[in-house]
Image (cartoon, coloured by chain):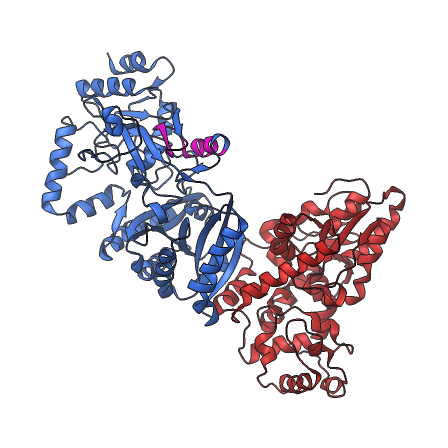
Chain colours: A blue, B red
C-alpha cells in the first residue's frame, strides 16, 4: 500500500496533499515548450517544519522532491522530470516583518512579488523591493532560486544581490539560517560571517528556501519612464555606458521587436527616472538628454521617443500575442553589454528562419557590469509545427549564448548540459561534492544541474 | 502622384509675407522673409527648413490660401532636411502600419463619427451629445486603418501621407457614409485642407467636431446649465488648417456659460504644446519645448483660468499632467460640453 500519500496528509493536513490526476495535471506542465512531466504527489506545506518533515520522508522513501513557487518558470525548471513530490510553496506567504528604517523585509519564500509590492505600497509607501518582469504571481523564493532580476537591477544588481539573510531547509531536513539572523542578531545583513551560501541559482537542487530577508529601497514619489530610440544597434552599448556612468536611473532596458511595427529594426532604451520632486526629476532628465544623449540627438542618430510615461515593466510575455495560440518561451542569458549588437543580429536571423517575429531585450545589471539579454519566441500551442520551430530556435539560441561568451540564465536541461560541458573541471568537481554532501540521495529536483 | 497645388505668383506679389514674419519660433523680418520664401519656392536650402517648429501656423497666417507649410514640408523631404532625428522619423512612419488584420466594414446610416487613430478615446464620445452619431470603428486593433496620416507633416514626410491617404479615404468611404464628424482637428484638416491642396478626392462631407457640438448643444439648449468656469483653450497645431472653424470655440463657450479668459497666447498667437519640438534635433529643442510649456501655462494662470480645454489627444499627452500640476483641470472640449448638460465628464 502507498504510504507516501497518507504521510504527506499527516504532515500538511487534509486538503493540502493530493495524488489525484486532475490536480497533478496542473503541476505536469509549465507555460513553455517542455513536454509534460507528471509528479506522483503534490503537497503544499505551511511551515518550514512541514517542509523539513516532507524532505525526511522523501529521503526515507527515496522519492524526488521538486519545489515550486508561482509556477511561472518557462524552461521546465519546476517540472518533476523524474516524478516524485511537487512541493507547492505558495501557502508559505507571510510577510513577517518590515523594518522601515533598516530598509528590509523578512518574508516567507512563497510570498508573491505582487503581494509584497501591494503591501509595501499600502503600509510602507516610501519603500520598494525589486520586482521582476515576471507576472506578479511569481514568488520571492522562486525568483531567488533562479538568480532573477528586476526593478533596480541597474543600481543594485541581481535580486540575489539584494538579500540580508535566508532560512533554508536542507535536503536532509535540517533547518539552517544564513546571515546575521544565524547568530540571533536580526535579519539586517548577510555579511560578514563565513560564506556558506550554496543555494542561490540551484533551482532548488541543494535545498529549499523558506524564508528571506530582502533589502528594500527608497520609493520616490515621482516616477516615470523616458524612451530613447536609435536605429544603429552598435550605438546601444555606448549609450548604456553613458547612462550607467551618470547613475541616475532605476532601470535601463534596451529592446527591439518586429511587432508592433514601430519597433521593427529600431532599438529603444527605456530609462526609468524617479524623484521626490518635479525639480529633482527634471534635473535628471536634463542630465540624461541635454548632457549625455545630446550628441546623438543633434547628429540625428538618436531621438527622444517619449517622456514622462507611466513606468511599465518589460514583459517579454507580450510576445505570446504575436502568433495565434498564445505560446511563448525565451532564452535568457547574462551577457556583457558590449554583446548587444551581435545578440540582436543573431537573434533576428534565427527568428526569421523559424518564421517567428523577433523580440529581443537587454536589461542592464549593475553599473553596466552585465545585462540580462533575452530572445523570445512565440508559438501556437495548438500547432505542433510552430512549437517545434520555437523549440529549435531556443536550442539554437542557447548555442549562440555560449558562442558569444555569455552564460545561459535559468537554463533548461539542454542549456544546463551546454554549460556543464564547458565548465571548469575543478568547479564541476566542487559542484558534484556539494550536491553529494547536501543531497546524498539525490532527491532534490533531479534532472536539474545533474553534474554526472 | 498627387502634387501640391501651390501658386507661386501669390507669394511673389505678397506684400506682407505673413507666413514667416508672424512665425512665433523664428524671428524673421519682412526682407529676410521675402528672400527665404523665394529660396523655398525655388527648391533651395533655407534656414527656415532647418528651424521650422512644424506648428502648422503659417497655413493660417497666409492670407492668400497658398499652403506655405505644406510647401515647407515638401522641401524638407526633397532636400532631406528632416526636423526630427532619423530614428524618430522611421519609428513614426512604421507606427502607422496596420498589423492586426483588416477592419470590419459595416454600412452606416446617417452621420458617422470618426475617431481616427484614437479609437481608445471612445469613452469621450458617450452621452446625449453623441447619441445621433455612429462610431465608425471601436476596435482599437484596427485604428491604423482610420489614421489620417497628417502627423507626418511633423516628420518631413509628405510622401508617406500621399502614399497612404487614398487607402484610408477608401476605408472610410466603404462605410457608405455621406457625412463624417471628425473627433480630432487633424482628421478634419486632412480631408478639408490637405486633400484638396494635393488634389486628392474625398467622397464624403466632413464636419468639424466643434461645429457639430455647437449645433447639438443648440438642440439641447433647454438642458444647459451655465458652468460659470474660467477656461483657457489649448489650440492644437492642426486647428491652423481650419481657422474658419476656430470661432466655434467661443460660440460653444458662450452657449455653456464659461468665460474664455483673455490671454496673450490665444487665437493666432496660440502656442504649440511642445510635443513635437521636444524631439527635434535642433540644439536646445527640449529646453525650448519646456520654456514654451511654462510660458503657456503661466499665461493661462495669469489670466485666471480654472480649466484648460483640449481637443487634441497629443496635446493632452504633452500638457495634461503639467496643467493639472499647476492647478488647472484638463478637460476635453466634449467633456466640458457634457458637464454643461448635466452629465459627468468621462
Residue A158 higher or lower than A54, as above or below:
below
Q: In which quarter of the image is residue A62?
A: top left
In this orientation, does residue B132 appear? Answer: no
Q: In this view, does A396 lie to the left or right of A326?
A: left
- Name which residue lies at 26% across and 53% down: A401
Residue A275 higher or lower than B298, as above or below:
above
**Residue B225: x percent and y percent?**
85, 42
Q: In this view, does B238 lie to the left or right of A109?
A: right
Residue A119, magenta (yes or no)? yes
Quarter of the figure that contains the C terminus of chain A:
top left
Quarter of the figure that contains the N terminus of chain A:
top left
Q: In this view, does A180 lie to the left or right of B259?
A: left
In this orientation, does residue A270 appear? Answer: yes
Number of numbered markers: 0
Residue A4 higher or lower than B227, as above or below:
above
**Residue B256: x percent and y percent?**
84, 48
In the orientation shown, which residue stands out farthest toward the right?
B222
Q: Quadrant of residue A355?
A: bottom left
A371 or B281, which lies in front? B281
Q: What stretch is highlighted in magenta?
A: A100-121
- Name which residue lies at 65% across and 77% down: B27
- Name which residue lies at 66% across and 64% down: B272
Q: Is residue B79 left or right of residue A126?
A: right
**Residue B147: x percent and y percent?**
63, 60
- Name which residue lies at 25% across and 53% down: A406
B84 or A391, which lies in front? B84
B322 or A370, which lies in front? B322
Residue A306, magenta (yes or no)? no
**Residue B196: x percent and y percent?**
73, 72
Amino acid at each position: 500500500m502507498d504510504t507516501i500519500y497518507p504521510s504527506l496528509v499527516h504532515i500538511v493536513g487534509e486538503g493540502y496533499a493530493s495524488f489525484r490526476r486532475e490536480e497533478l495535471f496542473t503541476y505536469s506542465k509549465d507555460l513553455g515548450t517542455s513536454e509534460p512531466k507528471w509528479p506522483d504527489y503534490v503537497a503544499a506545506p505551511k511551515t518550514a517544519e512541514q517542509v523539513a518533515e516532507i524532505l525526511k520522508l522523501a529521503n526515507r522513501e527515496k522519492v524526488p522532491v521538486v519545489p515550486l513557487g508561482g509556477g511561472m518558470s518557462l524552461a521546465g525548471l519546476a517540472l518533476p522530470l523524474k516524478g516524485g513530490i511537487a512541493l507547492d510553496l505558495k501557502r508559505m506567504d507571510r510577510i513577517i516583518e518590515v523594518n522601515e528604517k533598516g530598509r528590509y523585509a523578512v518574508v516567507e519564500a512563497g510570498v508573491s512579488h505582487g503581494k509584497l509590492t501591494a503591501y509595501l505600497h499600502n503600509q510602507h509607501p516610501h519603500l520598494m523591493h525589486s520586482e521582476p518582469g515576471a507576472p506578479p504571481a511569481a514568488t520571492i523564493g522562486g525568483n531567488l532560486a533562479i538568480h532573477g532580476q528586476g526593478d533596480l537591477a541597474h543600481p543594485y544588481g541581481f535580486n540575489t544581490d539584494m538579500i540580508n539573510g535566508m532560512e533554508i531547509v536542507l535536503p536532509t531536513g535540517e533547518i539552517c539560517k544564513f546571515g546575521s539572523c544565524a547568530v540571533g542578531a536580526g535579519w539586517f545583513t548577510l555579511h560578514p560571517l563565513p560564506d556558506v551560501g550554496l543555494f542561490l541559482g540551484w533551482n532548488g537542487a541543494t535545498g529549499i528556501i523558506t524564508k528571506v530577508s530582502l533589502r528594500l529601497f527608497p520609493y520616490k514619489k515621482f516616477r516615470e519612464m523616458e524612451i530613447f530610440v536609435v536605429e544603429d544597434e552598435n550605438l546601444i552599448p555606448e549609450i548604456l555606458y553613458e547612462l550607467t556612468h551618470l547613475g541616475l536611473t532605476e532601470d535601463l532596458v534596451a529592446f527591439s521587436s518586429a511587432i508592433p511595427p514601430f519597433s521593427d529594426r529600431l532599438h529603444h532604451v527605456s530609462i526609468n527616472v524617479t524623484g521626490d520632486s518635479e525639480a529633482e526629476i527634471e534635473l535628471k532628465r536634463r542630465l540624461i538628454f541635454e548632457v549625455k544623449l545630446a550628441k546623438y540627438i543633434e547628429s540625428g542618430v538618436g531621438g527622444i521617443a517619449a517622456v514622462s510615461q507611466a513606468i511599465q515593466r518589460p514583459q517579454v510575455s507580450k510576445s505570446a500575442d504575436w502568433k495565434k495560440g498564445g505560446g511563448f518561451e525565451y532564452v535568457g542569458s547574462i551577457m556583457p553589454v558590449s554583446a548587444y549588437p551581435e545578440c540582436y543580429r543573431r537573434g533576428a536571423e534565427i527568428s526569421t528562419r523559424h518564421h517567428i517575429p523577433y523580440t529581443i531585450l537587454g536589461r542592464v545589471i549593475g553599473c553596466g557590469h552585465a545585462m540580462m539579454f533575452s530572445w523570445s519566441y512565440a508559438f501556437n500551442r495548438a500547432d505542433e509545427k510552430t512549437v517545434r520551430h520555437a523549440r529549435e530556435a531556443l536550442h539554437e539560441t542557447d548555442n549562440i549564448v555560449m558562442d558569444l561568451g555569455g552564460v545561459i540564465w535559468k537554463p533548461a536541461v539542454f542549456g544546463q548540459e551546454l554549460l556543464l560541458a564547458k565548465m571548469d573541471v575543478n568547479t564541476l568537481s566542487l559542484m558534484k561534492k556539494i550536491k553529494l554532501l547536501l543531497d546524498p540521495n539525490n532527491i532534490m529536483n533531479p534532472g536539474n544541474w545533474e553534474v554526472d | 502622384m498627387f502634387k501640391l497645388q501651390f501658386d507661386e505668383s501669390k507669394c511673389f506679389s505678397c506684400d506682407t509675407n505673413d507666413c514667416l514674419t508672424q512665425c512665433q519660433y523664428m524671428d524673421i523680418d519682412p526682407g529676410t522673409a521675402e528672400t527665404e520664401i523665394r529660396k523655398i519656392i525655388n527648391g533651395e536650402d533655407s534656414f527656415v527648413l532647418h528651424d521650422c517648429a512644424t506648428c502648422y501656423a503659417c497655413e493660417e497666417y497666409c492670407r492668400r490660401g497658398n499652403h506655405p507649410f505644406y510647401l515647407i514640408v515638401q522641401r524638407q523631404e526633397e532636400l532631406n532636411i528632416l526636423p526630427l532625428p532619423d530614428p524618430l522619423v522611421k519609428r513614426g512612419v512604421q507606427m502607422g502600419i496596420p498589423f492586426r488584420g483588416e477592419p470590419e466594414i459595416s454600412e452606416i446610416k446617417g452621420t458617422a463619427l470618426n475617431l481616427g487613430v484614437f479609437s481608445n478615446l471612445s469613452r469621450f464620445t458617450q452621452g446625449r451629445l453623441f447619441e445621433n452619431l455612429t462610431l465608425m470603428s471601436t476596435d482599437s486593433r484596427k485604428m491604423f486603418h482610420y489614421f489620417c496620416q497628417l502627423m507626418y507633416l511633423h516628420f518631413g514626410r509628405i510622401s508617406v501621407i500621399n502614399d497612404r491617404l487614398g487607402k484610408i479615404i477608401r476605408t472610410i468611404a466603404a462605410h457608405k457614409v455621406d457625412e463624417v464628424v471628425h473627433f480630432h482637428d487633424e482628421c478634419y484638416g486632412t480631408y478639408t485642407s490637405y486633400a484638396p491642396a494635393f488634389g486628392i478626392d474625398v467622397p464624403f462631407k466632413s464636419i468639424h467636431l466643434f461645429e457639430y457640438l455647437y449645433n447639438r448643444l443648440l438642440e439641447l439648449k433647454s438642458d444647459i446649465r451655465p458652468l460659470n468656469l474660467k477656461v483657457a483653450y489649448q489650440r492644437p497645431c492642426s486647428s491652423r488648417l481650419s481657422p474658419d472653424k476656430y470661432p466655434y470655440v467661443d460660440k460653444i463657450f458662450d452657449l455653456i456659460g464659461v468665460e474664455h479668459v483673455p490671454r496673450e497666447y490665444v487665437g493666432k498667437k496660440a502656442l504649440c504644446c511642445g510635443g513635437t519640438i521636444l524631439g527635434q534635433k535642433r540644439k536646445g529643442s527640449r529646453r525650448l519645448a519646456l520654456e514654451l510649456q511654462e510660458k503657456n501655462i503661466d499665461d493661462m494662470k495669469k489670466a485666471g483660468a480654472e480649466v484648460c480645454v483640449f481637443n487634441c489627444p497629443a496635446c493632452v499627452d504633452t500638457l495634461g499632467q503639467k496643467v493639472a500640476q499647476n492647478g488647472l483641470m484638463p478637460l476635453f472640449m466634449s467633456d466640458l460640453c457634457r458637464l454643461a448638460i448635466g452629465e459627468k465628464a468621462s
